[in-house]
Amino acid sequence: MQHPIPILIVEYDKNLLQKIKKRLTGEKRFSLVWTDPSSGIDPLQAAAFHDIRIAVVDIDSGDSTEKLLDFARELRLKTCARLLLISGSRSREQIVSAIRHCFACGYLFRSQIDSIADILRSLLQEQTPHQYIMQELMLAVLTPAERSVLYALLEGSSDLKSSPKTLANQRTSILHKLHLKSTQDLLHIFTHY
């Protein structure tokens, strides 16, 4: 039998946390670690300690949405966990912005919480059409040339025909557009997507 897959739930709304627990009870495939203000558990430490594969973060609860989005982004940058965001917002602009900011692999409306187990199972697959769409959404800010450089970086290829100066400028532009500090962060995000 396979070991259960560790999933971190960051939820400050006790009612929603209970709904999530109820939906995931009996899922032998998952090992749940959850944090809320009363738990006293630092979510980043919990993610690292339990080698979390997926983190579920409700960006509408607890602190401000902006702080939770920044936390979710930090979680993606510091762990190998895929990220599922939960929100009540149905604003297309807010959804796209949240996905891009956090490099999320999934987004679930609060009203869809009954389907959380199915969504988590799908995120465990190598790649899904949903994940391709999310990744395309994030990379839409890049030019075709920048995408070629990104794909070459991810594949470890040096077959690009541009000058070293042009390639360096394109790497810098990619980092700037994706709001990343280093090529290491870039590789980490897209290698563990």
Image: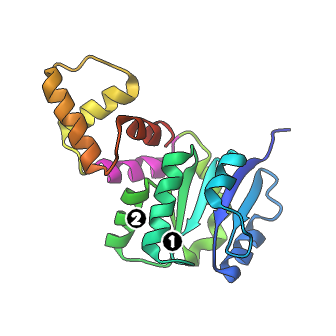
Residue 170 lies in quadrant:
top left
Kindly indicate whether the residue at mark 2 contacts the one at mark 1 (C-beta within 8 angstroms).
yes
8 or 119: which is nearer to us?
8
Helix, strand or loop at label 2? It is helix
Give the residue at mark 2.
98
Mark 2 neighbour density, 10 Å: few (under 14) some (14–19) many (20 or more): many
The Cα–Cα distance between marks 1 and 2, rounded to whole angstroms, is: 9 Å
Taking the spot 41% from the left edge, 53% from the top edge, the residue there is 134
According to the image, what is the colour scheme of the structure? rainbow
Q: Which residues are magenta?
A: 127-140
36 or 89: which is nearer to us?
36
> In the current view of this chain or complex, which residue is farthest to the right?
1
Residue 138 falls within the magenta-colored stretch:
yes
187 or 123: which is nearer to us?
187
Helix, strand or loop at label 1? It is loop
Give the residue at mark 1.
59
> Residue 158 got which mark?
none
Residue 56 lies in quadrant:
bottom right
In the displayed structure, would residue 180 be above or below residue 91? above
Q: Is residue 21 left or right of residue 61?
A: right
| Amino acid at dot 1 | Ile
Residue 137 falls within the magenta-colored stretch:
yes
Taking the spot 86% from the left edge, 38% from the top edge, the residue there is 1
The answer to whether any part of residue 105 appears in the image is: no
Taking the spot 63% from the left edge, 56% from the top edge, the residue there is 120
x%, y% of residue 46? Answer: 69, 54
Taking the spot 68% from the left edge, 44% from the top edge, the residue there is 51
Residue 18 lies in quadrant:
bottom right
Prevalent SS, magenta region: helix
